[in-house]
Image (cartoon, grey):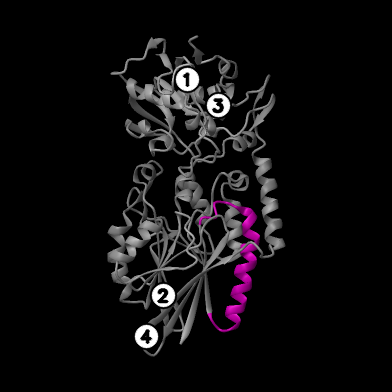
């Protein structure tokens, strides 16, 4: 009987504070197990990188790649944060000469070709125990296509490939960045999978799930745990006889000082790169989540200018985590107040839909809503900021009836007319306001983020001054 160990991380999202301890745990456990004559594989399941982090933003992921190298990962797959927030060229620079294999079965370029640094699968032989590793990631076809990727439905490609691999291997292990619901479905409909290493939905399965002969695992998020899977193989009967899994907490593990020092070096490099001055402000641009403020207006103005042929712009104040002080504004300042991987978008809404959104945005409970996921890195939704639009409100009326009068480009809003609205992709996913999800003719603008919109607008003559012009007025 022989035993193989798979140690994995998932959804670190650039939480560099966890990485030195993860390095210690992986190396300590690997040394122990390998000292006992057992093979260990170190694996990452994607979303290792997240551009909310200064280290990742300022080095375009090189800080993450350096930590992955020194930690000794052998196999990784790509998460949506890698594929959606970096260009193809940036990913090529990061992974082309990586010391680990990048497995992404369902990821190709739009021309149908696969870059040489992406492999469909990898077979590893451990003293006659042959294991087939496959990587798959969650498809967001409309977005990936804009970035030059074609990400196919894993349920269409996996059955054929798993069936093919089973002829040559004793076990099939999936590096899944699909989410727990899809992992469960995979286990049900695709025969021949021994283990699904799960990620994307940040699920922590301290007790693994079993569907038939398939073990489903998940080690949470942000480096709080490391996953550990054990496969037992009987060389006489040539079959897997046992599948076990556990999650190991990282909290009380001593951080590796060399990894910590390396991260500190990259942070200093990132700070230097992001110190680029964009514009000097003569006076502050403050933000208020619950009242109209200059910086909120400034972001709305920037979106209206960025997204061509738009009639107006709507964006929530909670996208901005702080204001801008008088003096020189750098890219680091913009990253600090707007770290989200959120992109501009244009969609068509009726005047009636716009009115509903504005009415809803005036309700305090709505402004105080907390949003989870969808790329949002803020704390509260906040009020709605306007550009190309003015609204009069009677605060004494009950919620849902406070909007008195709305003008777009100087003309009264017509409920049965359609308007092209510049806004943010988060709303099209149904986060915050339901009416946005009903929008038509949606056009996404990638790969730039809201902080790029802010940087561009800062360079426009008179833009800061215009942000002080009010758009919300009290009708009384």
Q: Bounds of the magenta span?
A: 11-38
How far apart are the alpha carbons under marks 3 and 4? Answer: 65 Å
Reading the chain from its start, which is encountered first: label 1 or label 4?
A: 4
Residue beneath disc 2:
131
Q: Position of residue 84 (x, y in %)?
A: 45, 45
Characterize the magenta stretch by its predominant secondary structure.
Answer: helix
Residue beneath disc 4:
238
Q: Nearer the viewer, mark 2 or mark 3?
A: 3
- Regarding mark 2 in the picture, which secondary structure is present there? strand
Direction bottom: furthest residue = 236
Give above or below for 258 relative to 420.
below
Q: Is residue 476 left or right of residue 280?
A: left
Question: Dot 3, crowdedness within 10 Å: few (<14), some or many (≥20)?
Answer: many
Residue beneath disc 3:
290
Q: Position of residue 452 (x, y in %)?
A: 53, 33
Question: Dot 1, crowdedness within 10 Å: few (<14), some or many (≥20)?
Answer: many
Residue beneath disc 1:
387
């Amino acid at each position: 009987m022989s035993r193989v160990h798979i140690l994995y991380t998932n959804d670190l999202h650039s939480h560099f504070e966890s990485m030195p301890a993860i390095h210690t745990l992986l190396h300590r456990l690997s040394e122990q197990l390998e000292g006992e004559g057992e093979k260990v594989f170190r694996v990452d399941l994607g979303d290792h990188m997240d551009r909310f982090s200064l280290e990742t933003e300022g080095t375009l992921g090189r800080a993450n790649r350096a930590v992955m190298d020194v930690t000794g990962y052998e196999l990784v797959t790509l998460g949506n944060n890698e594929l959606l927030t970096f260009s193809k060229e940036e990913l090529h620079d990061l992974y082309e000469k990586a010391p680990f294999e990048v497995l992404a079965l369902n990821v190709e370029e739009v021309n149908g070709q696969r870059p040489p640094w992406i492999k469909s699968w990898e077979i590893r032989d451990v003293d006659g125990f042959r294991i087939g590793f496959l990587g798959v990631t969650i498809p967001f076809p409309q977005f990936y296509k804009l970035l030059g990727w074609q990400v196919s439905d894993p349920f269409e490609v996996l059955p054929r490939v798993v069936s093919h691999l089973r002829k040559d291997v004793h076990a099939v292990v999936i590096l899944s960045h699909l989410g727990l619901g899809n992992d469960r479905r995979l286990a049900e409909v695709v025969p021949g999978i021994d283990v699904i290493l799960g990620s994307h939905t940040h699920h922590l399965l301290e007790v693994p799930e079993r569907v038939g002969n398939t073990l489903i695992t998940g080690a949470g998020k942000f480096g709080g745990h490391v996953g550990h899977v054990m496969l037992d193989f009987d060389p006489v009967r040539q079959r897997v006889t046992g599948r076990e899994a556990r999650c190991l907490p990282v909290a009380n593990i001593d951080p590796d000082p060399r990894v910590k020092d390396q991260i500190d070096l990259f942070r200093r490099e990132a700070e230097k790169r992001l110190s680029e001055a964009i514009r000097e402000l003569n006076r502050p641009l403050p933000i208020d989540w619950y009242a109209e403020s200059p910086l909120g207006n400034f972001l709305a103005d920037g979106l209206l200018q960025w997204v061509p042929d738009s009639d107006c712009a709507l964006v929530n104040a909670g996208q901005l985590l702080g204001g801008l002080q008088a003096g020189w504004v750098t890219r680091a300042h913009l990253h600090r107040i707007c770290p989200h991987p959120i992109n501009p978008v244009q969609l068509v809404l009726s005047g009636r839909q716009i009115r509903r959104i504005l009415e809803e945005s005036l309700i305090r409970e709505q402004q105080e809503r907390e949003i989870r996921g969808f790329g949002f890195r803020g704390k509260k939704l906040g009020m709605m900021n306007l550009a190309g639009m003015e609204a009069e409100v009677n605060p004494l009326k009950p919620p849902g009836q406070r909007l008195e009068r709305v003008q777009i480009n100087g003309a009264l809003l017509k409920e049965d007319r359609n308007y092209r609205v510049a806004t943010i992709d988060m709303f099209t996913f149904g986060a915050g306001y339901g009416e946005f999800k009903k929008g038509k003719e949606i056009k996404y603008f990638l790969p730039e983020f809201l902080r790029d919109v802010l940087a561009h607008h800062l360079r426009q003559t008179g833009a800061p001054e215009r942000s002080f012009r009010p758009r919300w007025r009290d009708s009384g």
